[in-house]
Amino acid sequence: MSLKKFGQRDIILNTMVAAPHSSFFIYDGDVFYNNTPSRPGTASPGPSSAVSEARMVSPGSVNLYEYNVDRPDTTTTDSLAIGLEVSAAFDPGTTGLDSGGPYTIANYAVAEAACSDENAPVTFVKDNNRIFPWISKDSAGSSWKTVTDSAYATEYAKGEILAGAYSLSASIVRELITSPYSSLNRHYRSLRNRLDFYAIRSPHYKISASLGDMSWNKDEQTLNTIAIPSIFFGSQIRPGTVSLKFYYTGSIAGELVDAQQNGELVQVSGSDSTNDGKVA
């Protein structure tokens, strides 16, 4: 192997690829991510009014950006309206404010009443004491993915504020699909061609096939899909690392592992040993 003598101006770039471990524990419909317990908050409710979570998301989810952690929501009281831009239709005289803006008005309803033209763009937003994203409609055409093109064109005036909300959360989602093809399930149909393509890795991907004493047609089978957001794994899930363990009355009923690193989930142990070595 040849050797290189580094000079004083040479720069060494070193890249580290991290592969963090992710674990999901599911019990009675509740999901726990990396054994994260419930952490009650003191200032604000979490994902539902019945649960108060300091992290603003359930234990089975991640809070994107970790915004608004245990931050109170003041929308239940007199919220503030912060004027980001003052339109010509805004009449500050009705609120006792000097012209010039922007304004901080004691109540959002007062700010709405100060707009003499009901068709004027709403250029102020509620301040609920939390961080939130917002976009002003302008010639650039920037908008949120949840706003359709037709709604953006017809429901919002130029200069109007499109406000979003944090926290943004992500977790695994399970979907039970019965009669995948005839029910026109869009998730299955979007994966259908890809499944046949992956048959070069394993015949078990095929939509319809006969293999030994097994035969199947995924178009007619009842399928279980588990969607895993990319925030948990980055660019890919490392082949061979997937392990699914199923428990019944406290004992392990079966463990499936991607043993061949090709996506086949093979039983490696379980209460019924006759299934060991078989693809689930």
Image (tube, grey):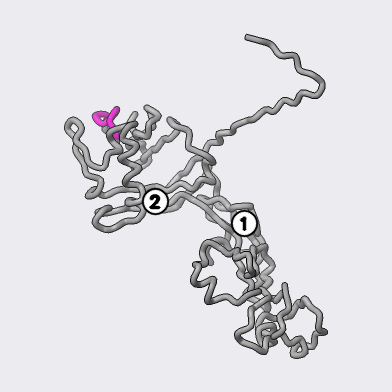
Name the residue at 75% across, 14% down.
5
Q: Residues within 10 Å of mark 2 (few under 14, many from 20)?
A: few
Name the residue at 27% across, 33% down.
203
Closest to the observer, 152 or 233? 152
Circle 1: residue type: Ala
Name the residue at 73% across, 87% down.
91
Closest to the observer, 175 or 36? 175
Please say whether residue 274 is one of the residues in the magenta stretch: yes
Q: Seen from this angle, which residue lies furthest front?
A: 139
Within the image, what quadrant is residue 160 found in? bottom right
* Residue under label 2: 174
* Residue under label 1: 54
Q: Could you say whether the residue bearing mark 2 is in a helix, strand or loop?
A: strand
Q: Which residues are magenta?
A: 273-279
Q: Residues within 10 Å of mark 1 (few under 14, many from 20)?
A: many
Q: Which mark is residue 184?
A: none
